[in-house]
Each structure stands twice: as structure tokens, then as C-alpha cells.
Image (cartoon, grey):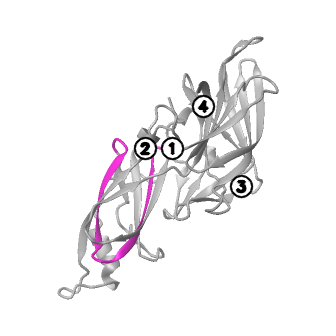
């Protein structure tokens, strides 16, 4: 996984990359302008505990040419392209060739997370096997592509968004009339299909797993509630999932989601078909999770709002 570095200067790299581009009439070297980029995770994304955007502490970025087919920075042998995130904001200074256009890609995450990898930031690969319940707060990540950025010296704001859908199991009660109080010791969530690569240019999940099913250890959410439809529920499990979208016009898919909960009274399994899942949306599966044959309902919330 990439290590954290400080903010880097891009002038030398982009001067080299721009040597075959528009040149200054006086020196023969391309004229550059310094531009400030304020990279922000939207304030409505910040929540407590699980899906805590404040745990994001590094943003990686790349500069591409206008046609998005040549990587200008980082260039071979350069320092890594990363900047620190503080209070959901990173300030980055980049030197760009004056009057030319560029494509910029940003990816923000927790620096200790090793579940994400890439050759370049056009596509992010996800290793779900590295998602574990005891590390629930480090898997949140955000992205943005800033197209057609002109080297004109003006400051830019970049707003990042989640590439994932978040799927939650929420219980109306952590006790039953017959068994008493319920204690969770673990859980597994199985999804009928999930993507393993995120295309930052299209915003689509790609490369679905071949066997069309996937199991992952969901985060155990302790002592937290989530409001769904005006009612508080116990937030007992969550997963971040890439949505295998067929196209930008069809951003949501319906999948079968099965939760297997390990409790002090044995294993409880709840399988829910036709669960709508969409990037940057939260899907909540709520009801009497620990009652056999429970009637569970689903609520989809855009933008991950509604946390407590």
C-alpha cells in the first residue's frame, strides 16, 4: 500500500511533461502557473463512529493530459503524489502549464487501510478479504475527477464522494421475549454479486466476482443507533460494497443480501432478496433481525445522511 508523504511540488515534473506541449516564445520552456486546490469531503458525510469521514487522513492525486491518455504526474522517479487531510480538507498547490487543459483525479482514504490498490487512479481495486470487523472505521474512502482544468492560476474547490454503497443491518431490539438479552460476537454478510474494481472516470463498479457471490466480515457496531424512517434502530452490522453498475444510466442494482449473525444463543441467518444498492447511498435493512421469519423492511437513503 502506498505510504504517506507530504505535499509535493509538481513544477519540475509538469515542466518535463509539458516540454512537447505549448512553449513560451521567449525561453522555449512552457510557462507554468501555480494553482491552489482545496479538496473537501462534504460536511454531510461526516458522522460519528462507523463511516466516519474524519478518519480519512490522506488524499492521492494525479494529473493527466487533456485527452486522459498520458499521465503527467507522478512522473517516473518522482515523489509520491499525496497530501495530508485535516478536518476533512486538504490544501494542494500544483503547477500547471499555462493555458493548457488537464484532467485531475483524487482518491482519499485512511493511510493505514491496505484494502485498496491501483496502478493509476483511473481504477481502484478492492480486496474485500482485508475488511475486518475490528477495523470498521478505516475503510471509508472518497474520490473525484476534475475534468478540463485549465492552467489559468485560479483556485479550485474539489468535492469528494463515496465510491461505495453502504449496507447496514439494523435491529429493532437486542433482546427477545424468550431468549433475553442478545450479545453479538461476529457476523458475515453475503452479497449475490459485488464489483471488485471502481472506475473513477465513469463512477461505475467493474469486474464482478465470477461466482456471483461474495462473503465478507461486516463491522460490528457497538452501542450505536441509527434513525430509519423516524425510528431508532440498533446498528449491528455494516459493509462498504462496490456496486456492479451496468451503465451510468442504471446506477442501482437489486441484490440478495444475507446476514449471518453469531450470538450468545446461536447463529441467526436472515436472507433478504431484491435489496436496492447504489453508489453513495446507504441501504438499511431493519426489523427483528433475531426473530425467525421476521418481516424485514428496506430503506435507501442518499448521501449517507441521517446518522446519530
Q: Earlier in the sequence, mark 3 or mark 2?
A: 2
Query: Which mark's residue is nearer the viewer, 4 or 1?
Result: 4
Is 291 on the left-hand or right-hand side of 141? right
Query: Is the residue marked by circle 4 packed among few (<14), some (14-19), or many (20+) residues within 10 Å?
Result: some
Write down the residue under mark 4: 228
- Please give the name of the residue rendered at 63% of the width and 55% of the height, measured from the top-left corner: 196
Q: Disc 1 vs disc 2: Cβ atoms closer than 8 Å?
A: yes
Question: Looking at this rendering, what residue extends furthest in the right direction?
Answer: 293
Q: Position of residue 251 (x, y in %)?
A: 63, 56
Q: Quadrant of residue 32?
A: bottom left
Q: Disc 4 vs disc 1: Cβ atoms closer than 8 Å?
A: no
The residue range painted magenta reads 86-112
Q: Is residue 12 magenta?
A: no
Report the predominant secondary structure element of the magenta stretch: strand
Separation (CA) of disc 3 from disc 4: 31 Å
Separation (CA) of disc 4 from disc 2: 26 Å
- SS for callout 1: loop
- SS for callout 4: strand
- SS for callout 2: loop
Separation (CA) of disc 1 from disc 3: 21 Å
Query: Is the residue marked by circle 1 packed among few (<14), some (14-19), or many (20+) residues within 10 Å?
Result: many
Is 166 on the left-hand or right-hand side of 88? right
Write down the residue under mark 2: 56
Question: Looking at this rendering, what residue extends furthest in the left direction?
Answer: 26
Q: Earlier in the sequence, mark 4 or mark 1?
A: 1
Q: Quadrant of residue 44?
A: top left
On screen, residue 275 above or below 183: below
Is 126 on the left-hand or right-hand side of 215? left
Amino acid at each position: 500500500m502506498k505510504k504517506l508523504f507530504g505535499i509535493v511540488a509538481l513544477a519540475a515534473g509538469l515542466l518535463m511533461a509539458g516540454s512537447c506541449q505549448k512553449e513560451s516564445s521567449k525561453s522555449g520552456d512552457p510557462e507554468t502557473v501555480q494553482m491552489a486546490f482545496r479538496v473537501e469531503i462534504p460536511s454531510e458525510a461526516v458522522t460519528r463512529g462507523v463511516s466516519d469521514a474524519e478518519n480519512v487522513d490522506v488524499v492521492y492525486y494525479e494529473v493527466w493530459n487533456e485527452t486522459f491518455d498520458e499521465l503527467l504526474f507522478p512522473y517516473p522517479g518522482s515523489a509520491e503524489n499525496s497530501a495530508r487531510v485535516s478536518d476533512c480538507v486538504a490544501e494542494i498547490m500544483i503547477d500547471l502549464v499555462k493555458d493548457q487543459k488537464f484532467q485531475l483525479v483524487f482518491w482519499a482514504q485512511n493511510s493505514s487501510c491496505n484494502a485498496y490498490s491501483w496502478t493509476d487512479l483511473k481504477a481502484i481495486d478492492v480486496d474485500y478479504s482485508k475488511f475486518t470487523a475490528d477495523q470498521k472505521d478505516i475503510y471509508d474512502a472518497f474520490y473525484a475527477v476534475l475534468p478540463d482544468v485549465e492552467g489559468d492560476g485560479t483556485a479550485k474547490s474539489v468535492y469528494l464522494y463515496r465510491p461505495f454503497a453502504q449496507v447496514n443491518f439494523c435491529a429493532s431490539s437486542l433482546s427477545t421475549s424468550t431468549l433475553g438479552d442478545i450479545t453479538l460476537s461476529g457476523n458475515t454478510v453475503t452479497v449475490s454479486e459485488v464489483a471488485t474494481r471502481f472506475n473513477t472516470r465513469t463512477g461505475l463498479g467493474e469486474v464482478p466476482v465470477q461466482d456471483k457471490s461474495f462473503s465478507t466480515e461486516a463491522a460490528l457496531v457497538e452501542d450505536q443507533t441509527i434513525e430509519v424512517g423516524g425510528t431508532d434502530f440498533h446498528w449491528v452490522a455494516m459493509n462498504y460494497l462496490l456496486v456492479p453498475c451496468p451503465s451510468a444510466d442504471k446506477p442501482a442494482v437489486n441484490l440478495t443480501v444475507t446476514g449471518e449473525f453469531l450470538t450468545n444463543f446461536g447463529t441467526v441467518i436472515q436472507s433478504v432478496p431484491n435489496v436496492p444498492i447504489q453508489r453513495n447511498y446507504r441501504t438499511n435493512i431493519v426489523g427483528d433481525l433475531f426473530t425467525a421469519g421476521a418481516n424485514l423492511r428496506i430503506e435507501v437513503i442518499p448521501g449517507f445522511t441521517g446518522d446519530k
